Structure formats: structure tokens, C-alpha cells
Image (spheres, grey):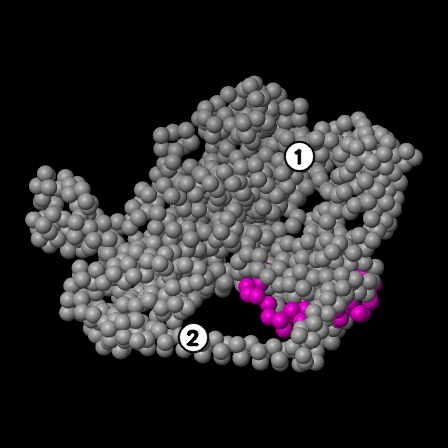
Amino acid sequence: MSGVNEIRSAFLDYFKREGHEIVPSSSLVPRNDPTLMFTNAGMVQFKNVFTGLEHRDPPRAVTSQKCVRAGGKHNDLDNVGYTARHHTFFEMLGNFSFGDYFKDRAIELAWNLVTKEFGLPADRLLATVYSEDDEAFDLWKKIAGLPEDRIIRIPTSDNFWQMGDTGPCGPCSEIFFDHGEGIPGGPPGSPDEDGDRFIEIWNLVFMQFDQQPGGERLALPKPSIDTGMGLERIAAVLQGVHDNYEIDLFGALIAASEEVTGVAAEGASHVSHKVIADHLRASSFLLADGVMPSNEGRGYVLRRIMRRAMRHAHLLGAREPVLCRLVPALVREMGRAYPELGRAEDLITETLELEEDRFRRTLDRGNSLLEEEERAVTENTRSRIENLQPDEVDYYASRAFEVNKDNKNIVFLSTIPEKKEALLKLPEKQANTVMEAALSGEIAFKLYDTYGFPLDLTQDALRARGITVEIQNFEQAMERQRAEARKGWKGSGEAAVETVWFAVKDRVGATDFLGYETDTAEGVVTALVADGKEIDRLEAGQEGVVILNQTPFYGEAGGQVGDTGEMSAPGVRFVVTDTQKKADGLSLHFGRVEEGVLTPDTALNLKIDAERRSQIRANHSATHLVHEALRQVLGTHVAQKGSLVAPDRLRFDFSHNKPMSAEEIEAVEEVANRIVLQNDPVTTRLMALEDAIEAGAMALFGEKYADEVRVVAMGHERDGNGRERVYSMELCGGTHVRRTGDIGLVSVVSESAVSAGVRRIEAFTAGQARRYLQGQDKRVREVANVLKVAVGDVVDRSATLVEERRRLERELADTRKKLALAGPAGSGGGEADVKKVGDVSFMGRTVEGIGGKDLKGLVDDAKKKLGSGVVAIIGKADDGKAGIVVGVTADLTDRYDAVSLVRAGSEALGGKGGGGRPDLAQAGGPNAGDADKALAAVEAALAGGA
């Protein structure tokens, strides 16, 4: 029993035998804690139970919880690969008691597990307790028989756990394993505790106090237990290895990485393989839980994890995608325990491949930016040397590449050792500070943050050119970003807890939903809330929230908007403007009392807006049809990333890496409407979650489902073997049409991008679709009337007109170019425009109505005409702005740089910068009226460089 999967199962089964309910791992995206970016401990999903906001039955639980520590307060990302026990993703084994057993039973269960079930020798185990926890100290002696010298009192916060500044807290007790005298390090609490000999394998938290704002700790009425054992750590101990990355799970993943890259996991390469294996797990599980790579929030952290792994694959010499080819190995190792991996395998594979392709392009873009910045440093350096005093130029220019205006500070490139040595020997009065030339830390951060270009790549690229990176400024920029990220996450959350709703639910219970079968019902008011507080009456004109024992009003969930309608009784009328769900089963009816006074225990007649609900039903059922149609047309990688089911439209976000073609959109409509026309009954049934998944029901990645789920099925089709099968089967709690024909028609009206790898479709159904298509038909007929052709000829006639316009535009552009260089002498078009600047021919002129692209063509033509020389042409635009292009013939590029010349002209036009190549550069400015000054500036710069 030493394999990771066996250890996990043994842990869960042991506590199940001891009366604990096995609770599936919650999502890596916390649903009940607005302070966390990722789930980072086993207790996160039980936080509301520990704080008393929720009650749970049975009072014992055991889990193997997926955890990520790669962002926010808990961030192990940069350590991964370089230590034996740091991971971005790990599994936390834990047992929990919610007011049931306490210290004695928790210690007994833990000791029996590690010594009897896992078979660890008792003489290699020791325990720590909080220094003031005499009870735990005595229990370890009594239950485990540990001698006092192997029960260590720890006086610091390391052994006292707090959920926050206030709330549940209590002492901890940790179990350590002694790897033996051959490993350096001392026991916990000793000066050498950071060594690797004694390794913590399990932490038992005894929650027994309630921390008050003033510092007082009150005893909890029902003390609880929360434990955490890292699966990877205990696996290393049980498998007799000291490094987590040597356990069987990582051994399999690293072996797959070796096979794909063709590089053995030896020496420095071993670090890269460890990073790849760890980050593959984190990336895949985050994707399976609905996180997509992006430039902010959780998606940004995911992208960093991915790119760090891809960087290490690059270091191993891989030039083709690596991570995406390792997904099958991960699914083989962990898919049985976490079936969401298998369900999301196509999505994970495709997303990783897309990101790896992007990253390779990122490397190319980063290199281009680096080259541009290097040229800028070179140009700036030359201009600074020109500011030296005449008697300093010969001396310093021969030794230094750059000299600041403050002649006591010399900056140089250290590519030539003898020059560096000469500078170091300068007298103190001439140079009291000598330092290497460095790329701005801000630029390095831009490369990292905007382009995903790792700092070490930047340093490697510049090192060969004698340039370093301003690390301090880079780190300052990084810290500013971290501060903004912390600020952005403070108080955020996808389901921020509102205490009042849990209190109400605990008192009155959940609301029974009747809306699957009826649009009307009767209900009794169980609570009233206004301004975040429970109240005992709502009067006419007052807004508030009504909570009932039962309701036909659907609360917003799963993308479907909440119902509206009316509640009434003799002399009382409450208009419902929205319905929401809170606290896992409480329906909140938002609205306004239009008549009378509403009090608890009032019996009301409930009536939803039936027409609105009918439109919502059609759009929700159509969403299911569209989802499956997208999978059939685009591929099984398509997964729902968000949706809106409203009365006027449906919006569906899905994973896909490129825009859909018109043919693909048409195919999706065709597939969906084929099922509509079948007019099959839409069936719903309650099933056990495992049975539903086994039957083929589609679950949304990242969602947590109850043991019993509602399965919605619609349509039929034949599979590749000719067997009949259900067209669409999904886990869904929303409301749907009775038959597919009630949808009427599905018409896709738009397709667009939402974020990287996520697309969005919007569609109409039923009457809205019919009205939309009627409007489209009307517009086509109007266009045909304008073009004076039949409706069937509109496309051909429009194409002809467009092509004719393009031809005329090309002819006009060619004519303008010819006129620009063919004017009379003295007007810019003849030989009179060419003058000698020193020994160089210079042609400068101004033209109007010619864009930047054509300006370049003019300059190229003029260069050919000159044969040898410099050309500057300024194009004036109608909005008062101007563009300037400077060209240098090939024989002169060793003397003159088009980029430097164009920048001089740009400054005269009121612009900044400019770029291009030594033989052709382009810039612009807002002041077209200064075109003559700009040409003069170019000429002056040319003369200065002669």
C-alpha cells in the first residue's frame, strides 16, 4: 500500500469506517470565501460550518482536497523544482469533526492510522503541541505512549491556528517523521529545524476558541477538529524516499516528460522535469475547474504557471509543444480519483497546445523588442558622447561607450575587458563611480508582464551584448503589480458570504421550488429583509426581500435570469422584480410593496410572469441544443465557459481558439434546428451524480454538484454505428420547454471573442428569431431596391461594386504617387529638389493626400532615381497631421542611419521617436504646417553627420 492512489483510498476508507462521510473535493475556485484566490486547504469548503453560518449532518467528514498555492498570500510558485516538497498543486488529506469528537479522539485516530494502517515505526515519530496546551501534551503520552522528550512544546504561532483576526481558532498538534541521522537537520523548535531530517506529515487543528475583536478568546460551545496531511509528503515517507518528486506519481509524469523531450532527468535537467510535472498538474486541474488563462486574476496565475513550465521545456531544447502531450499520462495517474480530468481532457489538451504556440511567438516578439531597445541604448549613448568637452572626447570615447552628462559618472559596456580595466584606473576626480550599462528594469518588466518574456531570457540575451538588467527597478515594478493584485482581490469573491441569509435559512429552512411544474402557487412568508437586516413588516412603497416556504419563482442560477411577477393577498400586493438564490436553497424575492402591509406568516397567491418565463424556457432549452451542436461542428474540446438565458436572447460562452466561419455558424444552426423540428419531449429526471455521469450526462467543469442531480435530455440521433442515442443530456437545474418544437426556431445573430480561447454566441428563438429574420429580409430587399437588381443578385452586384471601388482606389493611389514625383522644377518633383549636403545628394519634398504605406513607396522610387543619396518625403493629412519617411541608399547606410534622421524630422513636426531600418524609417507628428521645418531638420541632421 505505497502507491499514491492506494494511500489516498486507504486514508478515506479508514475514516469512513470510523463514521466519517467521504466528501468530494471542492473546486479549486472557492465559492464561499471572498478572500481566497484558490482553494489552498481542506477546510475551505467547510468554512461556513466552522463559523456557524451553516450546519452539517453528519458531523464527521473526510476529504482529499485539491489545493493550489501559486497566487496571493500562499504562493510557492518560485520554489517549485528547487526544493523537495514545494508544489503549486497538491492534495490535502483531512478528517473533520464539526462539534463531535475533539482532541482525544482526533489524536487516537491519527496515531492508529500512521502506526497501524500505514505501518510507520512509532520510534521514528514525534509530536509537537502548542506550548500552553497541556491537555494535548498529556493525551499524546497517554494515547500514543510517546515519551516526553518526543512531545515538543512550540510557543510560536506555528502551532496556533487562526482563521482570521477574529473567529474560530485553536492550538495545533503536528506529527513529524524522522528520516534518520544521515539527513542533516534538527527537530522542530531547535536551531536546525529547517533541515530535512524531521518532516511534518500531519497537522491536527483543535478549534476550541472564538477570537474576539478586543483580543479575548471565548470557548466555543462545540469545539471542532480540522486536520491536514499532504498526500505527496506521506507518500514520500511510505515509499522510502526523501524527495516528493521521487514518488510513483511524479516518477510516471517525469518519465513521460523524458520521453516527449528526449532529455534524461539528470543534473540541471532534473529541475526542469520537476517543474514540468508539477505545473502540468496545476494547469490541468485549474482548467478542469473552469479557470482559463488570461491577463488578470486567476487566469493570470494560471498563465504564469503554464509559461514557467513551457520555459523549462524550452530549456530542455523542446521546439514543439510538450505539456499538451503529457495530459494522457496525468489522466492515467489521477483520472480515477478525479474524473473531471477525463471529462475535460480535450479542453485541457487544446488549451495547453494553444498556450505553448503563443509562448513560442512570445519569445520571437520579446527578441524583437530587445533588439529595438538595444538600438535605442546605442543611439542614446552616441548622442551623449557628443556632449563631452572637446579635450575629453578622445580620451573617454576610446575607453567608454557611454558617458553621462555628469562627468563623474561613467557608464560603459564591459564587452572589451581592457577598456573596462582602463576605466577602473581613472583618477577619482575624473570618475568616482563606474558601473555597467543596464537595460531599464521597467523595460525588462514590460517584457515579462506584457509579453510573458522571462527575466532570465532577457538577461541571457543581453549578456552577450555586455548589457545587464536593472534588477532593483524590475523588482520594484513587480512589487507594484503584486500590490495592485492584492488590492484587486481584497473583498472580492464569486459567492461572497452574506451572513443574514445563512441566519435566515437556519431558522426557516430552504425554500421549496415548485416552478418546474407550475407558474402559480400559494406560499407563506417566512421572513422579510430590508437593507441587509431582518424586519417584521414591509409597508406600501417600501422595497425589500420576501422569503417564502415554497415558490414557483426561479432564482437566478446557471446563467438563467430570475423570474419576475406578483404576490398578492386580500389588500396586499407585492411586485417581484427579481429572484435570486442564496445560502444553498433560499429563494429571495426582490421587489416593492405596491399595496397594503406585508408581514411574516402572511399567505400569498404567487404568480410569475408566464410569458416571460415561456421565452426564458425556450432560450434555455435552445442553449443546450446549441452547446451540443457546437461540439459536433467544432469538436469535443468545446466546453461551456458561461451563459446568459434571458427572455429576449441566449448568450453562450464556450472554449474555442479561433473565430467561427460563416459555414460553421450555419452548420450549428442546422444541427440545432433539426432537433427543434423533431418536436421530441424534453425529459427531466433525478439521478445519482455518478449514475448521471456514467450515463453520459454533461457536467460543467468547475461546478460542484450534490449527490442527487437533475438530468435534462432532449432530441435523438444515430451514432456512428447506427445506434439511436440521446442528442443532448446535461446536468441542469433550470426550467425548460415541454417539447423541442416549443423552441420554434434557433437563429444565431452574432459570434465574437470574450477572452483568449473563449468565444461567444448570441442567438434568438421563437418569436424573437422570427422578427429578427423578417428584419434581415426587409433590409436585403431595401438593398436590392437601391442597387436596382433582384434580391437573388444582391451579393454578386455588391461584390462587383466593391471590386470596382478597390480598382479605382488603386488607380487613384498610383496617380497620386506619379504626380508626387513628377511636378515642375522647384515644386518638389524635379531635379531642383535635389541638393548637395556635403558630398551627399539630398532630396526633400512635401506631398498631400498620400498615406504612410504609399509614402514608403515614393521614397523607394526616389532612392532608385537618385542612385546614391538621402530622400525625405512628408505627407500631409487632411486632419492637420503629417507622416515622414526617410530613405538612405545602400551605399550610405554605413554613414547615415534613416532612424536617426527621421527622428529629427518627427521632432520638428511635434512628434516623438520613429522607427525602422538603417535604410528606411518612418515617423509622424501632429503639426503638418511645420513640414518645411521638418525637412530642414532632416537636412541639418544630415549635415551634422557628414
User: How far from the left and from the top, in percent, is residue 375?
Assistant: 27, 58
Q: Is residue 363 visible?
A: no
Which residue position is annotated with label 1? 498
Instruction: Answer whether residue 496 is magenta in the image.
Output: no
Which residue position is annotated with label 2? 813
User: How far from the left and from the top, in percent, is residue 393?
Assistant: 10, 51
User: How far from the left and from the top, in percent, is residue 98?
Assistant: 66, 32
Total marks placed: 2
Q: Which residue is drawn at 79% across and 41% down?
A: 576
Instruction: Answer whether residue 676 is magenta in the image.
Output: yes
The kind of residue on which mark 2 rests is: Ala
User: Could you tell me which quadrant the C terminus lies in?
Assistant: bottom left
Does 525 appear above or below 265? above
- Label 2 close to label 1 by CB (< 8 Å): no
Q: Which comes before the other along the chain, label 2 or label 1?
A: 1
Q: Which SS class for mark 1?
A: loop
Of the pair 317 and 753, the residue shown nearer to us: 753
The kind of residue on which mark 1 rests is: Glu
Identify the mark at residue 626; answer none if there is no mark: none
Q: Which residue is drawn at 52% across and 47% down?
A: 297
